[in-house]
Image (cartoon, rainbow, N blue to C red):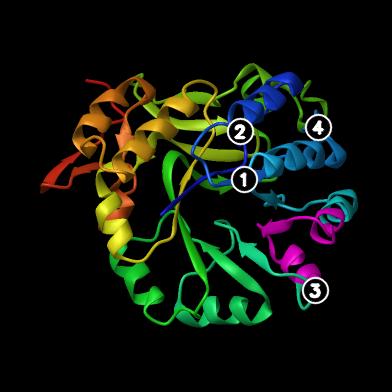
Amino acid sequence: MKISIGPISYFWERQKVFDFYKSLEETPVDIVYLGETVCSKRRELSLDDWLVIADQLSKSGKEVILSTLTLIEAASELSYQNRIALNERYTVEANDMATIHNLNAKHSFVIGPHINTYNKATLKLFSEMGGCRWVIPVELGKETISTILQERTPGMETEIFAFGNLPLAFSARCYTARAHNRPKDSCGFICVDYPDGLPMFTQEKEPFLILNGIQTQSVAKQNLITLLDEINELGIDIIRIMPQAEGTIEIIDLFHKVMNGEIQPTVALEQMEIFHSFGKCNGYWFGDEGMVWIDKTNKQNKSFDSILE
């Protein structure tokens, strides 16, 4: 299996973005996804900036993919999307159908996790349109994935979300701005103050969700490090790690060591506890609630691990 780094979900300052991708050059990461997928107002980097980073990563031996926005709301966003889609240098991860239609019959593309691909017929259709890799939607479990993969087109790669806060929903409303009583069009880019998103708590003060601009995420981080053997047996080619404000390099290293048999998954999981700020989850893999953590050795042991013990 290969290791990929998904696109940065959050709004980071310009220099932090450049420093982050520079730090990836010497890691065992195989694939890096670049670009803004959440909010078009986040313009710290232009497309030319992303291409500069892409060129640097390519020189260090990484495969680079340009990711696109998930929710298109304006003509200007569609125009920017088209520029990405029609670039001649890098493969594109399409996260909405407009991008796929622009790419159709022109370039191969990655079917992003936000494209509703939930059955064999849909995957076959996208393959015929030029899809070369399927990033599995996060809510699909092992049994469903296995069924779909039985008839995947030869050469179609598959990629699974292995670590990070799960993307749950996108909305036209910006919840981070609303939390600060600001209108969306005058947000003041408040989300830059939350490099790992804004935690939301219930009235009982229990962690519940992460607000990330127009995106809602799980408060617990999905972590499939103890399931890598099952993922490999299923024929999944790539595991995706999502960028974190701190600790991404250490997380990559632990996944790499488990994949190479250098340490046991349970040992790696213990060392990763410091990165589970509000708990961990893996329920979707077992066909259960996504928010729960299920011990692989005891599938009856379910816990909402985002409630801190």
State the residue position of label 1: 62
Q: CA distance from mark 1 to mark 4?
A: 20 Å
Taking the spot 28% from the left edge, 63% from the top edge, the residue there is 233
Element at label 3: loop
Q: Is residue 97 magenta?
A: yes
- Mark 1 vs mark 4: in front: 1
Residue 273 locus on image (x, y percent): 30, 24
For the residue pair 171 and 231, the one nearer the viewer reads as 231
Q: CA distance from mark 2 to mark 4?
A: 19 Å
State the residue position of label 4: 45
Taking the spot 23% from the left edge, 38% from the top edge, the residue there is 265
Disc on the earlier residue, 2 or 1: 2
Residue 288, visible in the rendered structure: no
State the residue position of label 3: 106
Residue 104 locus on image (x, y percent): 76, 75
Left or right of 117, for residue 57: right
